[in-house]
Image (cartoon, helix red, strand yellow):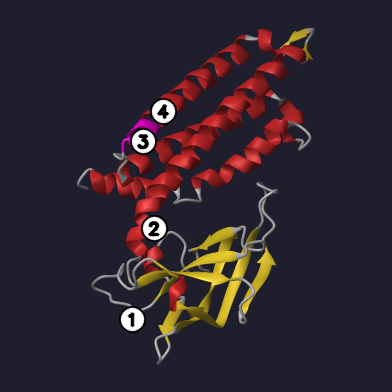
Amino acid sequence: MFAIAMTEPGTGSDLANIATTAKLSADGTHYVLDGAKTFITGGALADRVLVVCRTSAFDATNRRAGLSILVVDTTSEGFAVGRKLDKIGLKASDTAELSFSSVRVPVEDRLGEEGAGFSYLTHNLAQERLTIAIGASATAAAAVQHALAYTKERDVFGKPVASFQNTKFVLAECSADVEAIRQFVDRALELHNAGELTVPDAARVKLFATETAGRVIDKCLQLHGGYGYVLEYPIARLYADTRVSRIYGGTSEVMKTIIAKDLGL
């Protein structure tokens, strides 16, 4: 099992500011890795961790230079798993803090060229953001189905909740939003399959899909009343699990920055 370790305690969305270092040994056979990572999905269970680190001195004129990716065996001396973070959602997935104290990594375990790590990350982050958008599409659609089922079965004032005009209007809005997400995601998938999905396009689909899914799920939870706040109901778990989609893979604010830059702003 693999995990990828990018985020650091003092470095979230600003990947160019990574402080974890890997110094090449005098004989050129291995790197010595030192630093810490946090919010690492699968970090506690991984057999190998792809660690983004700085293999050359920080250059203020080109902050993206000097980053490399090392494949670290988690049985290596000096590697340690710290806290398992207790999240509000995604309970089936562990998220952990990792530390590296003079971990020896053979040069053969460097992924790609030295110093090219940032370009590798940029290339693959577009696909990751599309994947997150696909998940948002699925969770929003599921929320509407749960709300439909609940409001048809739940009676208030002697009639089903679904019979009230407000319920109909809210579900109609949610249905339109879900279809809009689906169409946007499908178009992004077509671009990806054609090798034409750009970083700004991926930012647009992630921003729209996750923000819209959040609104849809919130509305569907509201239609459940108090039961929507109880974890035995799927809508509550959807609410908790989906919230992080606007954070991981690049926050909504970072997506807006990427889009604005693409607009020449």
Q: Residue furthest bottom?
A: 26
Mark 1–mark 4 Cα distance, whole angstroms, equals 42 Å
- In the foreground, 49 or 208: 49
Disc 2 crowd, CA 10 A, few/some/many (<14, 14-19, 20+): some
Residue under pointer 3? 193
> Which residue is at the front of the view, 28 or 138?
28
Which numbered marker is on residue 149?
none
Q: Tag 1, which secondary structure?
A: loop
Name the image quarter holding residue 98: bottom right
CB atoms of marks 4 and 2 within 8 Å = no
Residue highlighted by disc 2 = 121
| Circles 3 and 2 in contact, beta carbons < 8 Å | no
Separation (CA) of disc 4 from disc 2: 23 Å
Residue at image location 36% in from the left, 36% down from the top = 193
Report how far apart the C-alphas of labels 3 and 4 lie in the structure.
Answer: 11 Å
223 drawn magenta? no
For badge 3, the amino acid type reads: Asn
Name the residue beneath numbered marker 4: 186
